[in-house]
Image (cartoon, grey):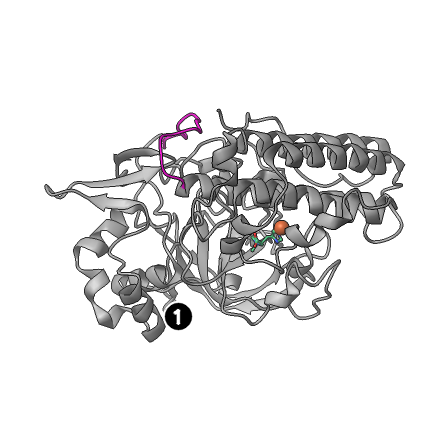
Amino acid sequence: MTASPNLQPSTGPAAPGESPEAMRERVAVLLGRSRERSTRLTALDDGELVAQHSPLMSPLVWDLAHIGSQEELWLVRDVGGREPLRPEIDGLYDAFQHTRASRVELPLLTPSEARTYVGEVRDKALDALHRSPLRGRPLEHEGFAFGMIVQHEQQHDETMLATHQLRAGGPVLDAPAPPRPATPADPGAEVLVPGGPFEMGTSAEPWALDNERPAHTVDVPAFVIDTYPVTNGRYLAFVEAGGYDDRRLWTDTGWAYRVAEDLTAPRFWSRDTDGTWWRRRFGVVEKLPHDEPVVHVSFHEARAFARWAGGRLPTEAEWEKAARFDPVTGRSRRFPWGDAEPGAEHANLGQRHLRPAPVGAYPAGASALGVHQLLGDVWEWCDSGWHPYPGFRMFPYPEYSEVFFGGDYAVLRGGSFGTDPAAIRATFRNWDHPVRRQIFSGFRLARDARPGAEL
Ligand code: AVJ
Ligand code: FE
């Protein structure tokens, strides 16, 4: 199996003034791309699809049918006004009724039944697309429900990719290596972000989810942020300096977790007797590449590293300001590089490569302030909990964002190599438990700027 080809996007919502016909065409391409990816990620033997590869994850066949179930709920029943295809299976695919660890015990659709189901749902969803005016009621306006379902399928595709990473056995996925920097980058480089107000969040992005809204002004004092995500090489220095055994570097909660889980290094790393470090990546064991962003670390590990290195994690507002603020115009951009949809030159997204790219590999994707690789490569832990923006309004259902507000979560920003361009923006907000590390999570450091200092 190969990774998704880099089909030229069409990754985003409608351009202003786009006709409904052009919008339908664009949505159909996005739906087709997400289904092509789901199909590749489930092109495995039935035994592999129904297996529990990790108690942290659902069986792959659950994700597949759940993708269909959400699509049926919003596009076929609500937008399309049709009767449910299979009302008896709703409960099986409701993420709130069964934990991931217990889904393997359910009377799930078989792989072949699941494929038939998602195919039938898709036919009816495309019919709904052709009948919807794509304007008027908020759910259909500018194709929102279709954009939401594209993002939902791509999010589960990233989840399935994480399941592939957890699965034992030889490789079944393949993709070319990511680009390398033209000249080696300094992994310790930093950028000064000037203090002052900037616009955070969005009220204009048609397919932004409820938690990204509304746009609001946030005053962020000057701070310094890493130009690149923290590399394996930097992180290895922390490991070898005894960071995992130094109680002082960890919070109480972080230390309790470190002890209970017996953590000694990022997930999927191993050290052999002669001291060489290896990492396992989609069934391949390879020497740890020092110039790639570290991945598969928890929030607690990221914080301990920051403490050791004399820095801290950026807040979510700091991360977004570093990504979006243009000091020339004073405005916030859609993407770090500007308003153009993500292309292959901007960021390592969309499972084009099955690993983070070395730091410095995406100069065309840098933000106005000169911060690199904010989108793609690795999700970045922020020192912020999961909270609504002022003026938040739930839409269209509380179980996407709202029910998680105030829970035991930390925010992640920027997407990973496994995040599709259709499912990421500089305003996009993700969250997870601070102990999770099977996700494609890394981080970068920030620190307070001394008043009047250059750097
Ligand atoms: C936004 C990634 C935290 O996967 O749990 C998928 C996205 N919500 N189906 C998740 C989601 C419902 C969600 N995250
Ligand atoms: Fe879901």
Judging by the rendered image, the residue that carries numbered circle 1 is 451
The quadrant the C terminus occupies is: bottom left
Question: Which quadrant would residue 179 be assigned to in this image?
Answer: top left
Judged from the image, the secondary structure of the residue bearing numbered disc 1 is loop
Q: Is residue 324 left or right of residue 242?
A: right
Left or right of 155? Residue 236 is left
Give the image location of residue 291, x and y in percent: 30, 40
Residue displayed at 36% across by 72% down: 253
- Left or right of 307? Residue 100 is right
Quick check: 342 above or below 244? above
Q: Nearer the viewer, residue 338 or 23?
A: 23
Q: Is residue 375 visible?
A: yes
Residue sitting nearer the eye, 48 or 365: 48
Q: How many marks?
A: 1
Q: In the displayed orientation, state which residue is furthest to the left.
A: 274
- Please report the residue visible at 72 percent of the width from the left and 64 percent of the height from the top: 394
Question: Residue 427: x and y, percent?
Answer: 60, 54
Q: Percent from the top left, x then y, of residue 64?
A: 61, 40
Determine the residue positioned at 70% across, 62% down: 214
Looking at the image, residue 67 lies above or below residue 182: below
Q: Three-letter amino acid code at disc 1?
A: Pro
Q: Residues within 10 Å of mark 1 (few under 14, many from 20)?
A: few
Q: Which residues are magenta?
A: 167-181
On screen, residue 439 versus residue 420, left or right, reads: left
Mark 1 sits near ligand 1, with its Cβ under 8 Å away: no
The front one of 389 and 350 is 350
Residue at 47% over, 62% down: 433
Q: Is residue 172 on the magenta stretch?
A: yes
User: Residue 263 in magenta?
Assistant: no
Q: Position of residue 243 (x, y in %)?
A: 22, 61
Q: Main secondary structure of the magenta part?
A: loop
